[in-house]
Image: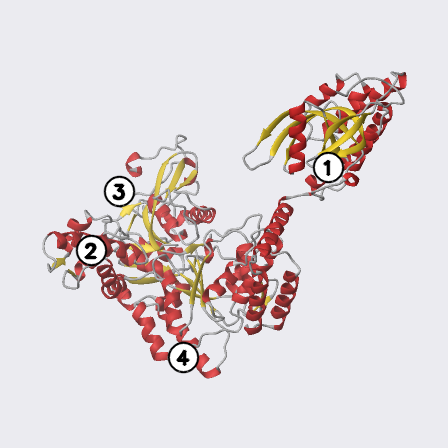
Amino acid sequence: MLFRNDKKDNRDTSHEAVPLLPLRELIVFPHEVYPIFVGRQKSIKALEAAETSKKPILLAAQKDARISDPGPDDIYNVGTLGVVVQLLRLPDGTVKALLEGKKRARIARYVSQDDYFQIEAEEIEEGCERTTEVEALMRSVNTTFDNYVRLNKKIPPEMVTSIAAVDDPAYLSDKLVGHLGIKLEDKQSLLECTNPAERLERILGYMRSELEILEVEKRIRSRVKKQMEKTQKEYYLNEQMRAIQKELGEKDEFKNEIQELEDKLRQKKMPAEAREKCEREIKKLKMMSPMSAEATVVRNYLDWFLALPWFEYTEDKLDIQEAERILEEDHYGLEKVKQRILEYLAVQTLVGQLKGPILCLVGPPGVGKTSLGKSVARATGRKFVRVSLGGVRDEAEIRGHRRTYIGALPGKVIQSMRKAGSGNPVMLFDEVDKMSTDFRGDPSSALLEVLDPEQNCTFNDHYLDCDYDLSKVMFITTANTLERIPRPLQDRMEIIRIPGYTETEKLQIAKKYLIRKQREANGLKEENIEFSDKAILAVIRHYTREAGVRNVEREIASICRKVAVEVVKTDRNAHIRVSASSLAKYLGPPKFRYGIAETEPQVGVATGLAWTELGGELLGVEVTIVPGRGKLTITGQLGEVMQESAHAALSYVRSRSEQLGLTPDFYQKIDIHIHIPEGAIPKDGPSAGITLATALVSALCRKRVKNDLAMTGEITLRGRVLPIGGLKEKVLAAHRGGIKSVLLPKDNEKDIEEIPAQILKGITLTKVGHMDEVLKQALVLDDPDSFLKPRRADDAPLFTSDDDKPIIVDDDDEAARVSRTNLS
């Protein structure tokens, strides 16, 4: 065999014929083992001959791998002599061979080319002296290879240890070449180089060049990783998806979508400003990637523009009789609102074009404010949209968010216009008094533009950033009280007060609307259930206490459900009559005592009238006197205004102490406690002033207050009675509570005409202008004309009975004794 070590001109002069295996895209170096797959018949025969004869085989690379049947000129002249370690024949006819390179060799001549290549090869001897330079070169190569492995993840880290253990420069150079990603020609050049030191220098150069490339790649990867945000990643992935879809032959939906948007814009009627904005956005959309986040934002923006009703209007029903019939059919009473709607339709008929009215319906819960909006829309033939403003505290809820924010949308006004689908709907802003304010803005201020007839023709939503005409919209707002609505906003609305219903009105509403509605809701026929008028009145009086009819409907629904159970159990055609005596069977014992007026006159107890969000209420005022040092205690969760009214009432009593038969310093030796029951409910306002003063005089002078009389009015320090608000609601509350007489300020005489006639028949209204008149009307007096007249100190006492003695403090008595009998 070859592989001898004779050295003469670096070549072995003896030759021996050995098989030749041409290799594609592979160069075998000495000291390395290579697995290869062989499919060409000549190559298979060469391998079999080498295995059979136990001869070495020359492994030389082809110059062009595309040639399937190479000739001598197509094969490099220098290769590696190796041995066949293992030969495995596969079922498909190919052969898997495991070859080990032994020594460099050169082709001397070709012996045969019949079945396979046979050549004469001469071994190439390598020589290298172990000088200091070679040692330094080997160290540099090892260090550089270590750095190379750190950056090149394809080479296992264990290879560094294996390379560092090699001490022969020739072996080291051959072992390193296999791990370098260099061209085939460069590898062949290294194979043909016989000087190991030179080979190491060239390998060191290759590794340093690769290291520079790897360092640049690492920096690029690091920089790109920092720059690549989520949206960019999605962009690249979506671009790949788009390319894949294009390769699969799928049609470009994005172009079709843009074409569809352009067609819609061409057909849509809209102002020039809006059309110009849409055309600009479509042009921008064409230049974007369809999968980018910005493209989605632009598409949504265009969808909003194309979906809004710019010039689409419904035709108003101008038949006054028909509109009046619809309003009467849906609601009982509410004459002011109905009259205002009929006025609008009449003017619209005459003028032909009119800005939509802006109405504000103010009243207690359950009187039909919200449902009235639907009836108005039905009567006028318009679309109806409702916007709930309860709890809204962000200005953007009205005006929308700017497009710079993720997930931005228009405000509730523009959203409602899109929902309505017409430019002149009836838009109901519900609970406009329940809005609040925080750091995000004041929504009530944003409503100023919406509800201003002079400004809402150019309403600008932050999202659209384009003027929109709201002048043809009929706006209706609802509120329970006006106090929580800012004055500028009130000024832009036409306020219509809806008072609470009287018992007669509630009875008619129950008979005409509520019973029929609940009977149908619970699956009952008309013959299954019947309500007597007395039963309905009993429900109103003893099971509800409200200004509206919401709880009345709830109680009627409860009766209908229980009747439905009886009908199902007994007979589907059964007839059940609900009377006043049978209510306890369906609703249990009465929840309220009808008429909360006191049963008899009492000292220090007066009945006032209050106006709340729920309507009118009776307000009991209690005053008691105890020994003390002039302290005034006020309880019942009273607001600042009501506390000030109590102080004003006490100052009035002190200023009239001589006329009342009290000593000037009577207040210094007693404590006065004013209490208004139902302390869990906040109370405020000046209208209880005369009630507080009456209770104080009653307690101090031991004079009883009429139990069937209520009063309302603000008091001044001079005793004048000033006007108050909500007179109708207060008189209705007095009528509900069984009060027979009401004292009211003279200046409220103009409001009496709002009170229903049937209420005025059962109650006496007395107009007063001064507190003296109030005391003469409210207190139980033997001689009202002589009350409050100036008296000398030596006059006989004004009060004759022991129970009616005034509280007079003896100046000589330092203990300021007060009779416990008089304080009881």
Q: CA distance from mark 4 to mark 3?
A: 71 Å
> Relative to 138, is 570 on the left or the right?
left
Where disc 2 sits, the SS reads helix
Asked whether residue 291 is in view, the answer is no
Give the secondary structure at mark 4.
loop
* C-alpha span from label 4 to label 2: 39 Å
**Sooner in the amino-acid sequence: mark 3 or mark 1:** 1
Q: Nearer the N terminus, badge 1 or badge 4?
A: 1
Query: Based on the displayed image, in which of its 4 quarters is residue 345 positioned?
Result: bottom left
Query: Residue 684 versus residue 600: which sits nearer the camera?
Result: 684
- Foreground mark, 1 or 2? 1
Q: Secondary structure at mark 3?
A: helix
- Amino acid carrying mark 1 in the image: Gln
Mark 3 belongs to which amino acid? Asp
**Marks 4,2: beta carbons within 8 A:** no
Q: Secondary structure at mark 1?
A: loop
Q: Quadrant of residue 517?
A: bottom left
Mark 3 surroundings: few (<14), some (14-19) or many (≥20) residues within 10 A: some
Task: Quickly name the residue at label 1.
Answer: 113
Q: Which residue is mark 4?
A: 318
For disc 2, the marked residue is 560
Q: How many marks?
A: 4
- The one of 194 and 569 positioned closer to us in this rendering: 194
Considering only vertical position in the picture, is 478 above or below 53?
A: below
Dot 2 or dot 3, earlier in sequence: 2
Q: Nearer the viewer, mark 1 or mark 4?
A: 1
* Residue 369 spot, x, y in % from top left: 38, 62
